[in-house]
């Protein structure tokens, strides 16, 4: 082989080795290269890399998140701001708790940077239509806690809580309810507390609604409605504490149970002193009555019938009898006696023996 050919061959081999080495380097460090990455790509890769085991990868993740933030990716700005803040304010919920926990170990607290990034994200998002109820709530918390400086912080925080609640944020509903509650605006408070209570995520709203009816706050005193909400609170607490140890579960149920008992005692006292009015009507003829009451639209409470052997009053089979009533059918000497027994037995079965009932024939 001539010298010229040897030189050419060596050059080709050298170039080939360089190419292989370059390819190997690119392969080993391709995580650092993102030739056609969009802002969203930088954000998503950044979140992924900050949770890797290798320190070099984690640093690349931080760099990617900063690149995304510099390109006005609001998610990246918020994530970095959360970590620069160090400790999140009470009630604030991170958009991505996994990425937050990974990144929080790598960034030192920097309150100034946190405020700047939160402010930038807030400005960008409020210029668009923000419908993320959790982020609306988080911004409200930041304003309320003074992290985001606003000229009228109370008004702006309230507005954001309102938007978050309208978009379905249960914590915001709860916050609004108690905001109005502390202002003694019980009508407005009841609206949001009812929505929060019906969501079944917290026992407090239902207990508070029960208290409104028990103490007559924004409502007339109504022990039955108080019991209704206290029972909802009890059901919610049973669900929320289902997986707790028995001792903790029993202790957690004390508050709603105590309120139910308290309201029941008051209800009994009220019913013993104030008769309850109940209208009834009869259908049929002089020897066969079918009796209906206004509180039972689903059907008659029973019948009173006269036969050759006497009068028989019978309570409808669908009615659960009180323990003090041993039979659903009884013989009498007159239609009036049978009617009286039927009405009294029905009232005792439905409302309890402690309730005084005054019956009136509906004309």
Image (cartoon, grey):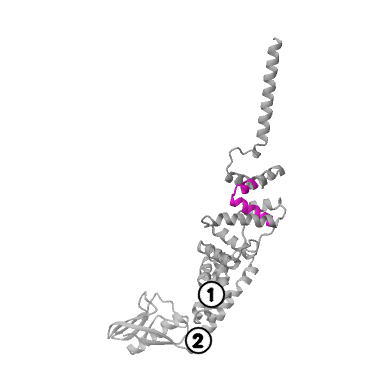
Q: Which residue is identified by label 1?
A: 209
In front of the other: 236 or 14: 14
Q: Which residue does the image show at 67% across and 31% down from the upper left?
A: 24
Residue 134 magenta:
no
Q: Position of residue 124 (x, y in %)?
A: 57, 54
Q: Position of residue 79 (x, y in %)?
A: 63, 53
Residue 79 magenta:
yes
Q: Is residue 361 above or below residue 243?
A: below
Q: Which range is magenta?
A: 66-85
Q: Which residue does the image show at 70% across and 18% down from the upper left?
A: 10
Mark 1 falls on what kind of element?
helix
Which quarter of the figure is the N terminus placed in? top right
Q: Residues within 10 Å of mark 1 (few under 14, many from 20)?
A: many
Q: Nearer the viewer, mark 1 or mark 2?
A: 1
Which quadrant of the figure has residue 331?
bottom left
Q: Which residue does the image show at 49% across and 89% down from the upper left?
A: 273
> In the drawing, does residue 62 fall left or right of residue 302?
right
Q: Which residue is identified by label 2?
A: 270
In front of the other: 131 or 307: 131
The CA span between labels 1 and 2 is 20 Å
Mark 2 falls on what kind of element?
helix
Q: Give the overall secondary structure of the magenta segment.
A: helix
Check the image and name the residue furthest to the top.
Answer: 2
């Amino acid at each position: 082989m001539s010298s010229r050919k040897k030189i050419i061959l060596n050059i080709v081999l050298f170039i080939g080795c360089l190419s292989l080495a370059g390819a190997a380097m690119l392969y080993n460090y391709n995580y650092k290269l993102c030739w056609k990455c969009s802002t969203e790509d930088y954000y998503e890769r950044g979140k992924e890399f900050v949770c890797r085991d290798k320190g070099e990868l984690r640093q690349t993740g931080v760099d990617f998140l900063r690149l995304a933030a510099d390109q006005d990716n609001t998610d990246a700005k918020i994530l970095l701001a959360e970590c620069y803040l160090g400790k999140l304010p009470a009630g604030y919920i991170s958009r991505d708790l996994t990425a937050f926990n990974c990144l929080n170990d790598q960034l030192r607290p920097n309150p100034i940077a946190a405020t700047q990034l939160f402010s930038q994200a807030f400005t960008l998002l409020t210029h668009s239509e923000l419908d993320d109820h959790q982020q609306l709530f988080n911004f409200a918390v930041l304003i309320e806690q003074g992290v985001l400086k606003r000229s009228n912080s109370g008004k702006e925080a309230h507005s954001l809580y309102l938007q978050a609640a309208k978009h379905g944020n249960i914590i915001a509903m709860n916050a609004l309810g108690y905001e109005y509650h502390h202002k003694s605006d019980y009508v407005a408070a009841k609206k949001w507390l009812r929505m929060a209570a019906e969501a079944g995520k917290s026992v407090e709203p239902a207990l508070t609604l029960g208290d409104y009816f028990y103490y007559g706050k924004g409502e007339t005193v109504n022990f039955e409605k108080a019991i209704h909400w206290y029972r909802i609170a009890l059901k919610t607490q049973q669900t929320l504490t289902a997986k707790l140890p028995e001792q903790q579960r029993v202790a957690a149920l004390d508050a709603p149970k105590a309120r139910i008992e308290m309201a029941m005692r008051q209800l009994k006292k009220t019913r013993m002193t104030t008769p309850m009015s109940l209208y009834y009507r009869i259908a049929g003829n002089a020897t066969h009555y079918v009796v209906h009451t206004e509180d039972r639209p689903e059907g008659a409470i029973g019948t009173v019938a006269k036969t050759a052997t006497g009068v028989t009053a019978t309570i409808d089979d669908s009615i659960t009898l009180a323990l003090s009533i041993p039979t659903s059918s009884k013989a009498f000497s007159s239609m009036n006696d049978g009617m009286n027994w039927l009405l009294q037995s029905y009232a005792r079965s439905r409302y309890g023996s402690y309730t005084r009932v005054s019956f009136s024939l509906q004309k």
